[in-house]
Image: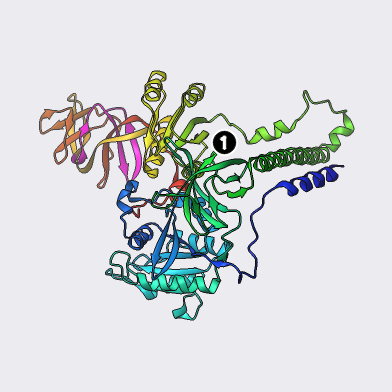
Amino acid sequence: LELDIDVQIASKISKIDRLPTVIPEDRSSLKPKPPIVCIMGHVNHGKTSLLDALRKTNVVESEAGGITQGLGGFLVKSNGAELCFLDTPGHSVFHAMRSRGCQATDIAVIVVSATDGVQEQTVESIRIAQDQELPIIIAINKCDVDGADVDGTKGQLMDAGVVVEDLGGETISVDISAKTGTGLDDLIDAIQVQAEMEELRADHKAAGEFMVIESKFQRGKGLQLNSIVRWGSIKVGDFFVCGKEYGRIKEILDCQGKRLKKAGPSTPVAISGLRGEESYGDEGLCVKNEKEAKKIIEYRKDKEAYESIWSVRAKEAEAHVKLRAAASASDKKSSSQRRRSRPTSPTHDVTVADIDGADGDDGNETLHIILRGDCQGSLEAIGDYLQLLPDHQVRAKLVKSAVGPPTITDLAAAEMLSNACLVLFNVKAGASIVKEAERLKLPLTAHDVIYNLFDDVRDKLSAMLPTVEKTKVLGSAEFLQPLKLSSGGRKTVTAAGVRVRNGTLVRKAKWRVLRDDEEIFTTDEAESMRHFKDSVESMPKGEECGVLLNGFEDFKPGDVLQSYEFVMEPSKLDDSAARRQQQYYDGK
């Protein structure tokens, strides 16, 4: 019966769903389309500078921190032909955005610095392109810089699985300088040659299909879908479905912000008109009318609900299998005991929730984060990074993330949570929201550079850690010679003649004697400390004095005397895994 239901629902959905067009093998009757080129590579290797040179515009300076934090598409006309370029972020946390760029791409150009060679994100970019079965062109940048090693870079590329033509492989490589423009014409020629080999063609008259690269909230316009038309043509007024939402195209903007009535294949556009929540990484598919769009969305949601139900049932079945296995193991382990006595019933039934709860909250302090940003891709990247932070002492939990400025609902949600904060990325809070957050004493921070946001979250987590007792050395001195002193006229005691090497010795602080870096004696304070004949309470660096420690006189050459105190200091967040993943744009 369950299988019959599955088949019936799947059959019903397939009749009314709109699926992306499968590109035919024989495309001879179709019109050519410009190649969609994805620029990828490691941070600071010159991706944005390359596009800047191709477009003859200055994008680098306008980006926050000199960083490509969004994903944009641009048309470039050169040598009588059009090429569509995508600029993907190089920061490691934007991995998903680079992947989406590849899904809409015909050719991948991987930029490698001739001075730095193949780096971590270079290898990642190669892997993404190979997984998408994209033809790769290598652009070796900064060839005009002192220390450039083009041949060494090609050798490193071979180690990464890419063999260029110079070394007997099939991958085209071009030596360029994005700064001076050297080699750019050769790169464009190489792209055009590769495009001709791929026979890139599309049906310009079919119903439009577009890949949503990024969704972005625009004040006064609502949600904007940064997209690439992959098949057919889209027009203002077209109804379309995208994921589990639908809409009607209200406005089409080209890469320069000009309004278009129509856009064909390989055109980068910004589309307005999607209803419902933000969408990204989905396929936008134009349909005949609103009625058809509603039916498609209705059945897509029904299908998701159906799959969700069966996912829960599968999880329950898996849990019961675990329970039976655990019970069987328990039976074998205590078989001898059961022969002597009858087992008692458990105090309550074991449920699936009991099993799932084992992976839940373990009582650690939690920083609840409500995140607001200008685009969904950035929110996704930030969410991925937060998962890399440690959770054994304190943890960061993303309660909510959404595109657009914060709302009063966000404040209400944060107020109900302990250790809650609002974090904004590339959006601003209204004056009333800021005032209300201050009244509620809710932390609200805004950032336009992503690694500043990471630092902010790390600082907040560190502040939640318990303080720890640490030893603070006030002064350190080296033993010079023993000093014989009379005590009360009856006996002689041995003091240490020392020279202060670091800090300041303090008589009433705690003291210890180190020998070969090991602590051999401690006391709560020095009994006496003298500079010549004067009794002193402290002695600065560079001075000599005599120190009498009650209970210790066996000083030897090489001994170190220290005065110290115990202080309470904040614990440090162990975020080494996250820091290894995070690659700063300044090359650190």
- Image point (15%, 31%), residue name: 530
User: Residue 73 is drawn in which quadrant?
Assistant: bottom left
Q: Please, which colouring scheme is shown? A: rainbow
| In this rendering, position of residue 486 left or right of residue 322 | left
Q: Which residues are magenta?
A: 498-525
Label 1 neighbour load within 10 Å: few <14, some 14-19, many 20+: few
| In this rendering, position of residue 233 left or right of residue 182 | right
- Asked if 84 appears above or below 434 in the picture, the reply is below
- Asked if 456 appears above or below 174 in the picture, the reply is above
Q: Looking at the rendering, in which quadrant would you find the N terminus?
A: top right
The x, y position of residue 550, in whole percent, is 28, 29
* In the image, farthest residue toward the top: 439
Please, what is the dominant secondary structure of the magenta stretch? strand
Give the residue pinned by disc 1. Answer: 276
| In this rendering, position of residue 310 left or right of residue 214 | right
- Image point (17%, 39%), residue name: 541
- Asked if 213 appears above or below 314 in the picture, the reply is below
In this orientation, does residue 232 appear? Answer: yes
Taking the magenta stretch, the answer to whether it contains residue 121 is no
The x, y position of residue 136, in whole percent, is 49, 68
- Asked if 422 appears above or below 79 in the picture, the reply is above
The x, y position of residue 115, in whole percent, is 33, 67
Q: How many marks?
A: 1
Taking the magenta stretch, the answer to whether it contains residue 503 is yes
Which one is in front, 89 or 513? 89
Which one is in front, 264 or 303? 264
The x, y position of residue 289, in whole percent, is 64, 43
Secondary structure, mark 1, is loop
In this orientation, does residue 572 appear? Answer: no
